[in-house]
Each structure stands twice: as C-alpha cells, then as structure tokens.
Amino acid sequence: MRFLIQRVSEAEVNIHSETVGQIQKGFLVFIGISITDTYEIADKMVHKLLNLRIFEDENGKTNLDLSSVNGSLLIISQFTLYADCKRGNRPSFTSAGKPDEANALYEYIISKCREMIPKVECGEFGADMKVSLINDGPFTVMLDSDELFL
C-alpha cells in the first residue's frame, strides 16, 4: 500500500466539473493499493498517516500531527502509484490491486480515518478526477507499506 501525502493549505477534487470533495488545511492523500494488501496493512498505514508530524509548531519545527492543527483529509484513490516502468515506455499496472478488492480497502481506509478526523472528504474510486491543491511547503511524503512494515 502506498500513501502519497501532500500537506496542503487547500485542495479539492472535481468529477465532471462538480466539486465532490474540498478541504482547507490538512493532507491530500493519494492511495495506491496493491494485490497483496490487507486490512491489517491498511490499519497500520492509517495509524502512521494520522500520527505523522509534519505541521509546524510555534518554534517552526515539524512537530504537530493532523489532529493538533484541526486538519482535514482529502483522500483520492490512485492505482497509478503502482506503475512499473522498468521495461519499455508504457507503464505496467499488474501490481495494482484488483478493482473490487482495492475499492473495499479504499472505503475501509476512509471509514477508519473518519473515526479519528472530523472532516474527511474523498474522490470516487475509478472515476476520472481533476484534483487541485495548494501544497504547503511544499511538503510531500511517500509512505510505502513494503518499506515501513517488512
């Protein structure tokens, strides 16, 4: 499982020119799910995400988590985080999760985040989405379960 996390001052997602999710200060999180991912891995990734301290404290140190700053989440599914570009010029996506299983994990992740964070917005699994953001910093972090939970 991969989470591409961007600290944002605002972000939104549109489908067919309609805004379906919008946040102010918080994290825009692109989520890639692989064929080997489980609910146990999802729980660990959500825990890591929600405790990630990348907001500045009163001394300018990145020492505060999402809850400490009353931040929000915008969660977007993105199977292309599992693009394999090793051979040729056309990416392969054979490591990406099967749509039904990946969607179930995606919805599970959203529900777990909503248990802890008051405002969680999301895109639509499998939709053609237009995402806009103002990256704060810029500050972008990649969490990869293969590297975090060996």
Image (cartoon, rainbow, N blue to C red):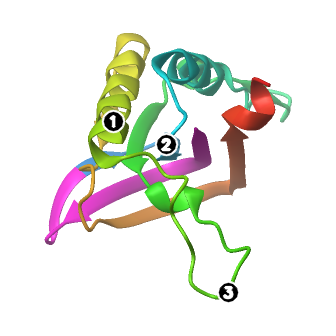
For mark 2, give the secondary structure.
loop
Point out the tag, 3 or 2, that comes first from the N-terminus.
2
The residues colored magenta run 1-20
Q: Which mark is residue 101?
A: 1
| Residue 47 picture location, percent across and down | 59, 16
| Residue 87 picture location, percent across and down | 70, 79
Viewer-proximal residue among 85 and 127: 85
Task: Return the residue at label 3.
Answer: 88
Decide if residue 33 is in sight here.
yes
For the residues bearing labels 3 and 1, Cβ distance under 8 angstroms = no
What kind of residue is marked 1?
A: Glu
For mark 1, give the secondary structure.
helix
On the rendered structure, is 46 left or right of 86? left
For mark 3, give the secondary structure.
loop
How would you rate the neighbour count of disc 3 (Cα within 10 Å): few for under 14, some for 14-19, many for 20 or more?
A: few
Q: Residue furthest top?
A: 115
Mark whose residue sits in front, 3 or 2? 3
For the residues bearing labels 3 and 2, Cβ distance under 8 angstroms = no
Seen in the picture, residue 67 relative to 30 is either above or below; the reply is above
Mark whose residue sits in front, 1 or 2? 1
On the rendered structure, is 133 left or right of 118? right
Q: Which mark is residue 121?
A: none
Q: Residue furthest bottom?
A: 89
Q: Quadrant of the C terminus?
A: top right
What kind of residue is marked 3?
A: Gly
| Residue 10 picture location, percent across and down | 45, 52
Task: Return the residue at label 2.
Answer: 33
